[in-house]
Amino acid sequence: MADLSEFKIVKEGEAEILMHKQNEVFYNKAQVNNRDMSIAVLRTFISKRKEEHEANLPKKAKRAPKVSESDASEPAKEDVPHASPPEDCRDNGECEDGNGMALDEPHKTAEEQVKSSEECNGEGESMSNADGKVQRELKPPRVLEALSASGLRALRYAREVEGIGQVVALDNDQASVDACRRNIKFNGSVACSKVESHLADAPVYMLTHPKEFDVVDLDPCGSPSVFLDSAVQSVADGGMLMCTATDMAVLWGEMGRYGSYPPRGKYCHEMALRILLASIEGIISPKVVICEDYFGNSKY
C-alpha cells in the first residue's frame, strides 16, 4: 500500500486521483474542458445508439391464441378418436395435434402448453427485423482510452457516464500504468468493476483488436496522426472515434504531416480542424468522428 503522504488528491468531476508530489505522471489541468465535452459527447452517443437500436427492433411476433382454463380442463374427445392412435404420437405415449400442441399433458396449464409449443417451433428465441437479420441485444459500449497516463479520463467515463460498459486504459509507461491502477482502486468499486489498465503500445494494441471497441478516445500530448490508422481499425461498425489534437501550429503551419498544405489566414483554427477531419476521413468514412482543439472549444 502506497504512503498517501507522498501524494496529493486531485478531484475532477466525480473522480479523484492521487498525484505524486514529484509529478511522475503527466496531468494536464488545461484539458478539463476537453474532458467535460468528451463526457457530454459520450452521453449523447450512448443515448442515440439506444434510440437507433430500439427503432430497428421488429414488432413482436403474434402469439398463438391462448386457451382458457375452462376449455383446457375439458377432455378433447372430439379431436382424438378412440379407435386408433394418431399418427404423430410420441414414444412416451404423448400425442400432438396439428399445431404441435401436446394433448395428453394434464399436469400442464394451457399457458405452459402454448409456451412449450412456441419453444418447439423456435419462436421467442430470436427476433428478426424487416430485412430478415437477427436483432441482437444491445450491449453497453466498450471504450478504449489509448493514452491514459493517470487514468483520469477513463475514471470519469466510468463514474459519470450512465450506461457505459468496460473502459480499457492503455499506456506504454510502467509508472503511468501503476498510477492508473492505484487510482482505480482509490475510486472504489464502480471504477474497479468497469476500468482496467494495461501496459501496452497503443498502435499495436489497437491493430491486434480490430472492431472491438464502440468508442476509441485519442488524447496524445501532441499530434494524433501516428495513431489514426490503428484507432480507426479498432472502432467497431457504428462506433465513434474521439480525437484530440494539441499540435495546432503543425495543423495550420507549413508542415504537411496530415497530407495537407493549409493557406495562412484568420480562419487558421477552423482550417486545422478541417485538415484533421479530412485526414481521418481519408482512412475510413462510415464512422462518426469527433474532433477537438486544444481548449476543447470546437467539435464536429
Image (spheres, grey):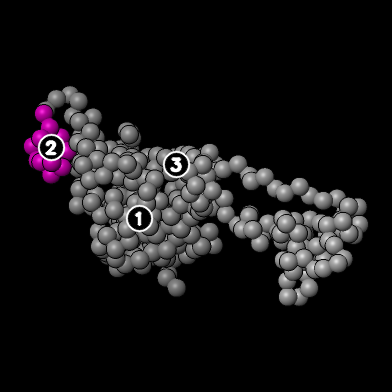
Residue at x 72%, y 49% (from the top left corner): 64
Q: Earlier in the sequence, mark 3 or mark 2?
A: 3
Q: Which mark is residue 45?
A: 3
Q: For the magenta stretch, what is the residue range? A: 250-263
* Residues at discs 3 and 1 in contact (Cβ within 8 Å): no
Query: Looking at the magenta stretch, what is its main secondary structure?
Result: loop
Q: Is residue 93 above or below residue 73?
A: below
In reply to whether residue 272 is colored magenta, the answer given is no
Q: Residue 226: x, y in percent?
A: 19, 52
In reply to whether residue 260 is colored magenta, the answer given is yes
Label 3 vs label 1: CA separation?
17 Å
Q: Which mark is residue 211?
A: 1
Q: How many residues crowd mark 1 within 10 Å: few (<14), some (14–19), many (20+)?
A: some
Residue at x 63%, y 54% (from the top left corner): 124
| Circle 1 or circle 2, nearest the eye | 1
Return the residue found at the far bottom. 92
Q: Earlier in the sequence, mark 3 or mark 1?
A: 3
Q: Quadrant of the N terminus?
A: bottom left
Asked which quadrant contains residue 18, the reply is bottom left
Q: How many residues crowd mark 2 within 10 Å: few (<14), some (14–19), many (20+)?
A: some
Q: How many residues crowd mark 3 within 10 Å: few (<14), some (14–19), many (20+)?
A: some
Residue of label 2: 260
Label 1 vs label 2: CA separation?
28 Å
